[in-house]
Amino acid sequence: AQSVSQHNHHVILSEAASLELGCNYSYGGTVNLFWYVQYPGQHLQLLLKYFSGDPLVKGIKGFEAEFIKSKFSFNLRKPSVQWSDTAEYFCAVNVGSNTGKLIFGQGTTLQVKP
Amino acid sequence: KAGVTQTPRYLIKTRGQQVTLSCSPISGHRSVSWYQQTPGQGLQFLFEYFSETQRNKGNFPGRFSGRQFSNSRSEMNVSTLELGDSALYLCASSFEGRNGYTFGSGTRLTVV
């Protein structure tokens, strides 16, 4: 069965520090990859997505992610975090085409200290 | 444009009862998916509907069911509620998967 693993469950950073959240998936075929963010009290919002093409994907709010097919990874990065980035981050995989089934990782809680 | 709307926002039900949750997708979106979010299990896929047909199904018991109407609005029903069904139920809609999936704010179900 397909699965998604997020290595960091809880990350604490100071403002201006760099961020990298790990995400690995288990599926050998074509995948579509997503990062979602859930700010406190708000709904899930799409940060960025990868379907094909350039493996370095840029999203909203200065986030980017790199798809490394050989490592089955899709890590999220941001050069300099802000207090407002405090949230829970979810990596998700969508296998194949024409399917609305997303498999989510367990999530990473990011706390940014001012 | 309006986002994904889920109603009601909060529900409290008694064990053994049934409940119906509603989801109105973004206008023009034909795919509607449902997820259950709990602290212990995280986000788990329930099912997806596309053009009134169930296209995908997750690993949930038959007590969980859904349907989609011709206007793409979707409902999910949980019968014979159990305490473990307490969760945040999320709905997501998409025009085509490549555009990503937009989530609603969810319905918080508490079973007592």
Image (cartoon, coloured by chain):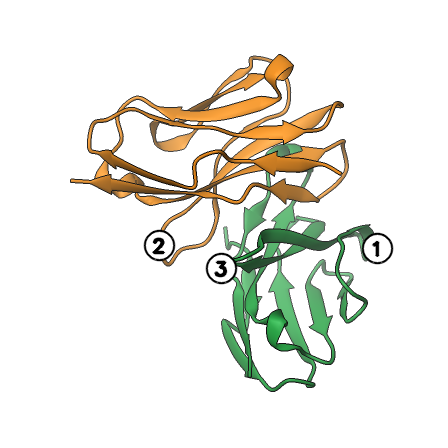
Q: Residues within 10 Å of mark 3 (few under 14, many from 20)?
A: many
- Name the residue at 65% across, 42% down: A102
* Distance between mark 1 and mark 2 Cα atoms: 34 Å
Asked if B106 appears above or below A47 in the picture, the reply is: below
Residue B26 in view, yes or no: no
Identified at 62% across, 62% down, the residue is B24
> Is circle 2 on the same chain as circle 3?
no
Q: Is residue A12 left or right of residue B97?
A: left
Task: Supply the letter of whichever chain is green.
Answer: B
**Residue B55, position as x, y percentages in the image:** 82, 49
Confirm whether circles 1 and 3 share one chain.
yes
Position above or below: B92 against A30: below
How packed mark 2 is, by other alpha carbons closer than 10 Å (few <14, some 14-19, many 20 or more), is few
Q: Residues within 10 Å of mark 1 (few under 14, many from 20)?
A: few
Element at label 2: loop
Disc nearest the viewer among 2 and 3: 2
Which quadrant holds the N terminus of chain A? top right
In orange, which chain? A
Number of marks: 3
Q: Can you identify the residue that label 3 sits on? A: B105
Q: Which residue is mark 1?
A: B53
